[in-house]
Amino acid sequence: MSSAALSIAPPGRTASDPLTGWERLKLDRMAMISLAVLLISALACFIAPPLMESARNTTSASTYSAPGALVTAVDGVVYKAWLGTDASGRDVLYRVLSGGRVSLVVGLCAAAVSLFIGTLVGMTAGFYGGKVDSFLMRLVDVLYANPRVLFVLILISALTGPLNLWINDARAAADVRNWMTIKAWVDGAIPYQRTIILIFCLGFIEWLTMARIVRGQVLVLKEQQFIAAARVLGQSQWKIMVRHLLPNLWTVILTYLTLTVPVVVLDESFLSFLGLGIEEPASSWGTLLKEGASAVNPLISRWWLLVTPAVAMGGTLLALNFLGDALRDAFDVR
């Protein structure tokens, strides 16, 4: 961020007053552009698919239609496929938006899991120190030494069976008690078992960096005078961590959360590209990239199947990374 931008004082402030982190962020043009891109992408993925014709997600005879072609669905509905159709005659625009919804949900939920685990481990290690700190950091080192993809595959294999058993037990209990609403929820979750497992597995491997960052911040904060005053007043260790340390960590946590989401989305896309991630009927940007890559060859280039999800995913991840860098620069002026 240029020094000229920092010299502009917001209304009601003098030029000599130091700018807050949010004010520095608002003056960062790239951060505001990235935020706008993220808002547009999120709104398009979560709001647009339910508003579009359901025929766009059904098969048709117009397979591999070029962008802008008129398509007649099996139910007779005619629509214009702005980004073409896939191998089953489904609208690529609809599939990219619905796939982006799955990728963003997986990224946000898995990042939230990693946020909880990493913050808890980092705060515990930094605050208690000694043997607790040594044990937790050695655990982090051991997990860092293992290949992430192999670790995810082991977790997926280990959790698939218990989750299927739990779902079957839940359906049986709902049938016995005639809980039709709960049974409908459980039935709706059956096609997304792999998605649920993937969220937990990716969140479980992405907390390591968060734990180290939080631990480093806690080591500095616990030596400050306000922590010593809280101890003198007789506050418990848990209350000190929750009421005094955690509020001073939220900017760091928010910054690294925005940087964790694109990493999780990339991991999910990589696993889905290999056929190990999201399964039908759900689709993500990774599965769409896999389908697009198989449809592109030297003889016939159906480029829209590969370019469209790649541009959507690349633009969203770039915006997340730019926003994360801007947050770090705004709240950590050093």
Image (cartoon, rainbow, N blue to C red):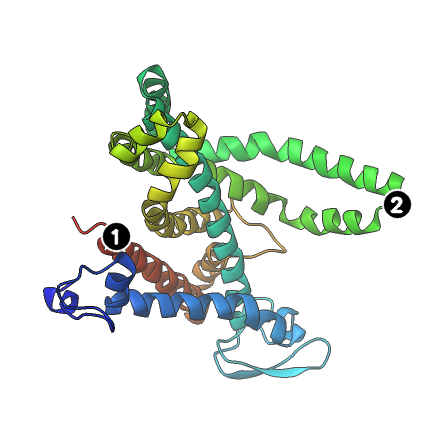
Give the camera-side residue of 66 and 251. Answer: 251
The amino acid pointed to by label 1 is: Phe
Does the residue at mark 1 contact the one at mark 2 (Cβ under 8 Å)? no
Residue at the image position 18 percent from the left and 52 percent from the top: 333
Residue at the image position 22 percent from the left and 49 percent from the top: 332
Local crowd at mark 1 within 10 Å, few (<14), some, or many (≥20)? some
Position of 64 relative to 149 (above/below)? below
Tell me how many marks there are. Answer: 2
Give the camera-side residue of 222 and 329. Answer: 222
Residue that lies at the very extreme toward the front in this rendered image: 233
Q: Disc 2 designates what residue? A: 178
Q: Secondary structure at mark 2?
A: loop
Q: Quadrant of residue 197?
A: top right
Residue at the image position 33 percent from the left and 24 percent from the top: 137
Q: Quadrant of residue 62?
A: bottom right
Local crowd at mark 2 within 10 Å, few (<14), some, or many (≥20)? few
Residue 302 seen from this side: no
The amino acid pointed to by label 2 is: Asn
Tell me the quadrant of the picture where the N terminus can be found.
bottom left
Q: Secondary structure at mark 1?
A: helix
Residue that lies at the very extreme toward the top in this rendered image: 131
| Dot 1 or dot 2, earlier in sequence | 2
Q: Disc 1 designates what residue? A: 331
Residue 141 place in picture, x, y as percent? 32, 25
Instruction: Give the alpha-carbon distance from disc 1 to disc 2, as whole Å.
Output: 53 Å
Residue 108 place in picture, x, y as percent? 47, 51
Residue at the image position 51 percent from the left and 66 percent from the top: 45
Mark 1 or 2: in front is: 1
Position of 130 relative to 185 (above/below)? above
